[in-house]
Amino acid sequence: MTLKVGLLFGGRSGEHEVSIRSAGAIATGLAANGSQYQCVPFYIRKDGTWASTDQSAEVLATGTPLTCDDTPENPAQLWQFPPEAAAVELWFPILHGPNGEDGSIQGLLQLMQVPHVGSGVLGSAVGMDKITMKTAFAQEGLSQVTYATITREEVWSNPCIFPKACDAVEAKVGYPCFVKPANLGSSVGIAKVRTRQELEDALDSAATFDRRIIIEAAIANAREVECAVLGNGNPQASVVGEITFDSDFYDYETKYTDGAAQLIIPADLPDSVVGRIQDLAIAAFQAVDAAGLSRVDFFYQPHTDEIFINEINTLPGFTALSMYPKLWEASDIEFSTLVHQIVQLALERGKALQNPS
Protein backbone atom coordinates (compact mmCIF):
# COMPACT_ATOMS: atom_id res chain seq x y z
CA MET A 1 0.00 0.00 0.00
CA THR A 2 1.36 3.40 -1.00
CA LEU A 3 1.66 6.03 1.73
CA LYS A 4 0.90 9.62 0.75
CA VAL A 5 3.68 11.79 2.20
CA GLY A 6 3.15 15.54 2.28
CA LEU A 7 6.58 17.13 1.77
CA LEU A 8 6.35 20.57 3.38
CA PHE A 9 9.08 23.06 2.46
CA GLY A 10 9.93 26.72 1.86
CA GLY A 11 8.61 28.90 4.66
CA ARG A 12 9.19 32.39 5.97
CA SER A 13 12.64 32.05 7.50
CA GLY A 14 15.98 33.13 6.09
CA GLU A 15 16.68 29.47 5.30
CA HIS A 16 13.97 29.34 2.63
CA GLU A 17 16.33 28.38 -0.20
CA VAL A 18 18.09 25.75 1.90
CA SER A 19 14.69 24.22 2.68
CA ILE A 20 13.97 23.87 -1.04
CA ARG A 21 17.29 22.10 -1.57
CA SER A 22 16.62 19.76 1.35
CA ALA A 23 13.15 18.99 -0.01
CA GLY A 24 14.58 18.08 -3.40
CA ALA A 25 16.93 15.55 -1.84
CA ILE A 26 14.17 14.05 0.32
CA ALA A 27 11.83 13.74 -2.67
CA THR A 28 14.56 11.78 -4.45
CA GLY A 29 15.01 9.60 -1.37
CA LEU A 30 11.28 8.86 -1.16
CA ALA A 31 11.17 7.98 -4.87
CA ALA A 32 14.08 5.57 -4.42
CA ASN A 33 11.84 3.48 -2.14
CA GLY A 34 9.71 2.51 -5.13
CA SER A 35 5.93 2.47 -4.81
CA GLN A 36 6.04 2.52 -1.01
CA TYR A 37 5.65 6.31 -0.90
CA GLN A 38 3.84 8.90 -2.98
CA CYS A 39 5.47 12.30 -2.44
CA VAL A 40 3.05 15.22 -2.61
CA PRO A 41 4.92 18.57 -2.44
CA PHE A 42 3.54 21.52 -0.47
CA TYR A 43 5.50 24.75 -0.82
CA ILE A 44 5.03 27.65 1.59
CA ARG A 45 5.92 30.95 -0.03
CA LYS A 46 8.03 33.60 1.68
CA ASP A 47 4.84 35.48 2.61
CA GLY A 48 3.51 32.42 4.45
CA THR A 49 0.92 31.44 1.84
CA TRP A 50 0.64 27.78 0.83
CA ALA A 51 1.13 27.41 -2.93
CA SER A 52 -0.88 25.03 -5.09
CA THR A 53 0.53 21.55 -5.56
CA ASP A 54 1.32 22.37 -9.20
CA GLN A 55 3.33 25.42 -8.14
CA SER A 56 4.94 23.37 -5.36
CA ALA A 57 6.02 20.71 -7.85
CA GLU A 58 7.52 23.40 -10.07
CA VAL A 59 9.54 24.91 -7.21
CA LEU A 60 10.70 21.44 -6.17
CA ALA A 61 11.80 20.64 -9.73
CA THR A 62 13.55 23.92 -10.45
CA GLY A 63 14.88 24.73 -6.98
CA THR A 64 13.78 28.34 -7.53
CA PRO A 65 11.49 30.13 -5.03
CA LEU A 66 8.31 31.85 -6.19
CA THR A 67 8.61 35.63 -6.28
CA CYS A 68 6.37 37.41 -3.80
CA ASP A 69 6.36 40.12 -1.15
CA ASP A 70 7.23 39.28 2.44
CA THR A 71 3.65 39.90 3.57
CA PRO A 72 0.58 38.30 1.92
CA GLU A 73 -1.78 40.46 -0.11
CA ASN A 74 -4.69 38.68 1.53
CA PRO A 75 -3.90 37.50 5.11
CA ALA A 76 -6.97 35.23 5.02
CA GLN A 77 -5.11 33.08 2.49
CA LEU A 78 -2.71 32.01 5.24
CA TRP A 79 -5.41 29.62 6.42
CA GLN A 80 -6.22 28.24 2.97
CA PHE A 81 -4.51 24.93 2.28
CA PRO A 82 -4.47 23.15 -1.10
CA PRO A 83 -7.25 20.54 -1.25
CA GLU A 84 -4.65 17.78 -1.66
CA ALA A 85 -3.61 18.38 1.97
CA ALA A 86 -6.69 16.52 3.18
CA ALA A 87 -5.42 13.24 1.69
CA VAL A 88 -1.94 13.39 3.26
CA GLU A 89 -1.27 10.40 5.51
CA LEU A 90 2.07 11.61 6.89
CA TRP A 91 3.74 15.01 6.83
CA PHE A 92 7.47 15.44 6.23
CA PRO A 93 8.21 19.05 7.21
CA ILE A 94 11.62 20.25 6.11
CA LEU A 95 11.11 23.91 7.03
CA HIS A 96 14.34 25.16 8.56
CA GLY A 97 14.50 28.04 11.03
CA PRO A 98 11.68 30.06 12.67
CA ASN A 99 8.12 28.87 11.99
CA GLY A 100 9.52 25.58 10.74
CA GLU A 101 11.49 23.88 13.50
CA ASP A 102 10.40 25.89 16.53
CA GLY A 103 7.15 24.05 17.23
CA SER A 104 4.91 26.34 15.17
CA ILE A 105 4.30 24.05 12.19
CA GLN A 106 4.48 21.01 14.46
CA GLY A 107 1.50 22.39 16.42
CA LEU A 108 -0.46 22.88 13.21
CA LEU A 109 0.29 19.35 12.02
CA GLN A 110 -0.65 17.99 15.42
CA LEU A 111 -4.01 19.75 15.17
CA MET A 112 -4.48 18.06 11.78
CA GLN A 113 -4.14 14.73 13.67
CA VAL A 114 -1.78 13.36 11.03
CA PRO A 115 1.65 11.91 11.95
CA HIS A 116 4.66 14.02 11.08
CA VAL A 117 8.40 13.53 10.85
CA GLY A 118 10.56 14.87 13.66
CA SER A 119 10.06 16.27 17.11
CA GLY A 120 6.77 17.50 18.50
CA VAL A 121 5.94 20.96 19.78
CA LEU A 122 7.99 20.70 22.98
CA GLY A 123 11.12 19.15 21.52
CA SER A 124 11.09 21.53 18.56
CA ALA A 125 10.59 24.64 20.69
CA VAL A 126 13.24 23.72 23.25
CA GLY A 127 15.66 22.65 20.55
CA MET A 128 15.20 25.94 18.68
CA ASP A 129 15.54 28.36 21.58
CA LYS A 130 19.22 28.40 22.51
CA ILE A 131 18.59 29.77 26.00
CA THR A 132 15.91 27.24 26.92
CA MET A 133 17.97 24.50 25.28
CA LYS A 134 20.96 25.31 27.47
CA THR A 135 18.75 25.28 30.55
CA ALA A 136 17.60 21.76 29.64
CA PHE A 137 21.19 20.66 29.03
CA ALA A 138 22.31 22.12 32.35
CA GLN A 139 19.54 20.23 34.14
CA GLU A 140 20.99 16.99 32.70
CA GLY A 141 24.51 17.96 33.78
CA LEU A 142 25.90 18.35 30.25
CA SER A 143 29.06 20.48 30.12
CA GLN A 144 28.69 23.80 28.31
CA VAL A 145 30.78 26.89 27.74
CA THR A 146 30.22 29.92 29.95
CA TYR A 147 27.34 32.04 28.66
CA ALA A 148 25.19 35.04 29.50
CA THR A 149 21.85 36.28 28.25
CA ILE A 150 20.40 39.68 27.45
CA THR A 151 17.13 40.98 26.04
CA ARG A 152 16.35 43.38 23.24
CA GLU A 153 14.83 45.72 25.82
CA GLU A 154 18.19 45.93 27.62
CA VAL A 155 20.11 46.45 24.38
CA TRP A 156 17.80 49.19 23.16
CA SER A 157 17.34 50.76 26.57
CA ASN A 158 18.53 54.12 27.90
CA PRO A 159 22.29 54.96 28.02
CA CYS A 160 22.52 53.86 31.65
CA ILE A 161 21.22 50.29 31.39
CA PHE A 162 22.97 49.05 28.25
CA PRO A 163 26.56 49.80 29.38
CA LYS A 164 25.93 48.01 32.68
CA ALA A 165 24.58 45.00 30.80
CA CYS A 166 27.72 44.95 28.65
CA ASP A 167 29.86 45.22 31.79
CA ALA A 168 28.11 42.13 33.16
CA VAL A 169 28.71 40.21 29.93
CA GLU A 170 32.40 41.13 29.89
CA ALA A 171 32.80 40.10 33.53
CA LYS A 172 31.10 36.73 33.10
CA VAL A 173 32.01 35.67 29.57
CA GLY A 174 35.00 37.77 28.48
CA TYR A 175 36.57 37.93 25.02
CA PRO A 176 36.52 36.51 22.44
CA CYS A 177 32.88 35.50 22.52
CA PHE A 178 29.95 34.79 20.24
CA VAL A 179 26.75 36.81 20.13
CA LYS A 180 23.73 34.87 18.91
CA PRO A 181 19.99 35.50 18.52
CA ALA A 182 18.27 32.86 20.65
CA ASN A 183 15.86 31.67 17.98
CA LEU A 184 17.57 31.59 14.60
CA GLY A 185 19.16 28.56 13.00
CA SER A 186 22.11 27.91 10.66
CA SER A 187 24.39 30.56 12.17
CA VAL A 188 22.12 33.42 11.04
CA GLY A 189 22.77 36.69 12.90
CA ILE A 190 25.82 35.34 14.77
CA ALA A 191 28.96 37.41 15.31
CA LYS A 192 32.34 36.71 16.91
CA VAL A 193 33.52 39.72 18.93
CA ARG A 194 36.78 40.67 20.61
CA THR A 195 36.25 44.23 21.82
CA ARG A 196 33.65 46.30 23.65
CA GLN A 197 32.68 48.15 20.48
CA GLU A 198 32.25 44.90 18.56
CA LEU A 199 30.14 43.55 21.43
CA GLU A 200 27.85 46.56 21.39
CA ASP A 201 27.48 46.45 17.61
CA ALA A 202 26.82 42.68 17.60
CA LEU A 203 24.19 42.97 20.34
CA ASP A 204 22.46 45.75 18.44
CA SER A 205 22.44 43.61 15.29
CA ALA A 206 21.24 40.46 17.08
CA ALA A 207 18.40 42.43 18.65
CA THR A 208 16.98 43.06 15.17
CA PHE A 209 16.57 39.28 14.75
CA ASP A 210 15.24 38.27 18.17
CA ARG A 211 14.23 39.79 21.50
CA ARG A 212 16.38 37.27 23.40
CA ILE A 213 20.14 37.05 22.86
CA ILE A 214 22.81 34.70 24.15
CA ILE A 215 26.54 35.43 24.49
CA GLU A 216 28.89 32.44 24.65
CA ALA A 217 32.58 32.20 25.47
CA ALA A 218 34.84 31.07 22.62
CA ILE A 219 37.13 28.09 23.24
CA ALA A 220 40.68 28.38 21.97
CA ASN A 221 41.81 25.62 19.61
CA ALA A 222 38.55 23.70 19.97
CA ARG A 223 37.57 21.14 17.35
CA GLU A 224 33.98 21.31 16.11
CA VAL A 225 32.46 17.85 15.98
CA GLU A 226 28.93 16.63 15.27
CA CYS A 227 26.93 13.48 15.84
CA ALA A 228 23.62 12.44 14.28
CA VAL A 229 20.83 10.80 16.27
CA LEU A 230 18.07 8.60 14.86
CA GLY A 231 15.16 7.09 16.77
CA ASN A 232 12.35 7.72 19.22
CA GLY A 233 12.37 6.06 22.63
CA ASN A 234 15.61 4.16 21.96
CA PRO A 235 17.70 6.51 19.81
CA GLN A 236 20.96 5.55 18.15
CA ALA A 237 24.01 7.72 17.50
CA SER A 238 26.00 7.81 14.27
CA VAL A 239 29.73 8.00 13.79
CA VAL A 240 31.20 11.36 14.75
CA GLY A 241 32.20 13.89 12.12
CA GLU A 242 34.37 16.99 12.27
CA ILE A 243 34.04 20.33 10.49
CA THR A 244 37.10 22.33 9.46
CA PHE A 245 37.08 25.70 7.73
CA ASP A 246 39.28 28.69 7.00
CA SER A 247 36.77 31.38 7.99
CA ASP A 248 36.74 32.93 11.46
CA PHE A 249 33.86 30.68 12.47
CA TYR A 250 31.26 28.37 10.97
CA ASP A 251 28.88 31.07 9.73
CA TYR A 252 25.92 30.77 7.33
CA GLU A 253 27.97 31.47 4.19
CA THR A 254 30.59 28.91 5.14
CA LYS A 255 27.95 26.31 6.00
CA TYR A 256 26.13 26.49 2.66
CA THR A 257 28.91 27.37 0.20
CA ASP A 258 30.35 24.38 -1.61
CA GLY A 259 34.01 23.94 -0.68
CA ALA A 260 34.03 26.55 2.10
CA ALA A 261 34.04 23.90 4.81
CA GLN A 262 35.42 20.39 4.93
CA LEU A 263 33.51 17.53 6.52
CA ILE A 264 35.80 14.87 7.94
CA ILE A 265 33.82 11.66 8.46
CA PRO A 266 34.63 9.86 10.61
CA ALA A 267 36.55 12.33 12.72
CA ASP A 268 40.10 11.39 13.72
CA LEU A 269 39.40 10.94 17.41
CA PRO A 270 40.22 8.29 20.01
CA ASP A 271 37.51 5.63 20.36
CA SER A 272 36.96 6.67 23.97
CA VAL A 273 36.21 10.26 22.91
CA VAL A 274 33.87 9.10 20.13
CA GLY A 275 31.96 6.96 22.61
CA ARG A 276 31.58 9.85 25.03
CA ILE A 277 30.32 12.15 22.27
CA GLN A 278 27.79 9.54 21.13
CA ASP A 279 26.51 9.09 24.68
CA LEU A 280 26.22 12.87 25.12
CA ALA A 281 24.39 13.22 21.81
CA ILE A 282 21.74 10.75 22.95
CA ALA A 283 21.52 12.47 26.34
CA ALA A 284 20.96 15.83 24.63
CA PHE A 285 18.32 14.29 22.34
CA GLN A 286 16.42 12.98 25.34
CA ALA A 287 16.91 16.16 27.38
CA VAL A 288 14.84 18.24 24.95
CA ASP A 289 12.36 15.40 24.20
CA ALA A 290 13.42 15.19 20.57
CA ALA A 291 12.06 12.53 18.23
CA GLY A 292 12.94 10.97 14.90
CA LEU A 293 16.10 12.80 13.99
CA SER A 294 18.53 15.38 15.31
CA ARG A 295 22.12 16.51 14.89
CA VAL A 296 24.07 17.44 18.01
CA ASP A 297 27.09 19.75 17.84
CA PHE A 298 30.02 19.76 20.25
CA PHE A 299 33.36 21.43 20.93
CA TYR A 300 36.23 19.10 21.78
CA GLN A 301 39.27 20.56 23.52
CA PRO A 302 42.16 18.09 22.96
CA HIS A 303 44.53 19.73 25.48
CA THR A 304 42.13 19.22 28.37
CA ASP A 305 40.14 16.30 26.91
CA GLU A 306 36.95 18.24 27.58
CA ILE A 307 33.76 17.98 25.54
CA PHE A 308 31.31 20.88 25.56
CA ILE A 309 27.88 20.56 24.02
CA ASN A 310 27.07 23.44 21.69
CA GLU A 311 23.53 22.83 20.46
CA ILE A 312 21.01 20.40 19.05
CA ASN A 313 19.31 20.80 15.68
CA THR A 314 16.02 18.87 15.67
CA LEU A 315 15.43 19.36 11.93
CA PRO A 316 18.89 19.32 10.32
CA GLY A 317 19.54 20.09 6.68
CA PHE A 318 19.26 17.39 4.02
CA THR A 319 21.17 19.10 1.22
CA ALA A 320 24.10 17.54 -0.62
CA LEU A 321 26.40 19.42 1.77
CA SER A 322 24.54 18.47 4.95
CA MET A 323 26.30 16.64 7.73
CA TYR A 324 23.29 14.64 8.96
CA PRO A 325 22.83 12.28 5.97
CA LYS A 326 26.58 12.07 5.47
CA LEU A 327 27.08 10.88 9.05
CA TRP A 328 24.54 8.09 8.57
CA GLU A 329 26.02 7.17 5.21
CA ALA A 330 29.31 6.64 7.02
CA SER A 331 27.35 4.59 9.57
CA ASP A 332 26.17 2.21 6.79
CA ILE A 333 22.71 3.73 6.28
CA GLU A 334 22.46 5.07 2.73
CA PHE A 335 20.24 8.05 1.93
CA SER A 336 17.02 6.39 0.71
CA THR A 337 17.11 3.93 3.62
CA LEU A 338 17.61 6.84 6.02
CA VAL A 339 14.58 8.64 4.60
CA HIS A 340 12.55 5.42 4.89
CA GLN A 341 13.57 4.90 8.52
CA ILE A 342 12.71 8.50 9.42
CA VAL A 343 9.24 8.10 7.91
CA GLN A 344 8.71 4.83 9.76
CA LEU A 345 9.77 6.45 13.03
CA ALA A 346 7.18 9.17 12.44
CA LEU A 347 4.47 6.57 11.89
CA GLU A 348 5.56 4.74 15.04
CA ARG A 349 5.44 7.92 17.11
CA GLY A 350 2.13 8.96 15.58
CA LYS A 351 0.51 5.67 16.60
CA ALA A 352 1.93 5.98 20.11
CA LEU A 353 0.53 9.47 20.53
CA GLN A 354 -2.91 8.42 19.27
CA ASN A 355 -2.93 5.33 21.49
CA PRO A 356 -0.98 6.29 24.65
CA SER A 357 -2.11 3.17 26.49
Image: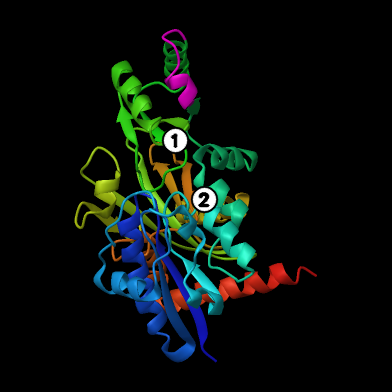
Percent x, y of residue 220 = 34, 32
Q: Which residues are magenta?
A: 151-160
Q: In the image, 321: left or right of 164?
A: left
Percent x, y of residue 44 = 40, 62
Residue that label 2 marks: 102
Using the rendered image of the protein, determine whether residue 193 is visible from the camera's viewpoint: yes
Going by the numbered disc 1, the residue's amino acid type is: Asp
Depth check, front residue: 139 or 269: 139
Residue at x 34% of width, y 43% of height: 188
Residue that label 1 marks: 210
Q: In the image, 115: left or right of 84?
A: right
Q: Secondary structure at mark 2?
A: loop
* Number of marks: 2
| Colour scheme of the picture | rainbow
Percent x, y of residue 163 = 42, 11
* Vertical position of residue 86 compared to residue 163: above or below: below
Residue furthest to the right = 357
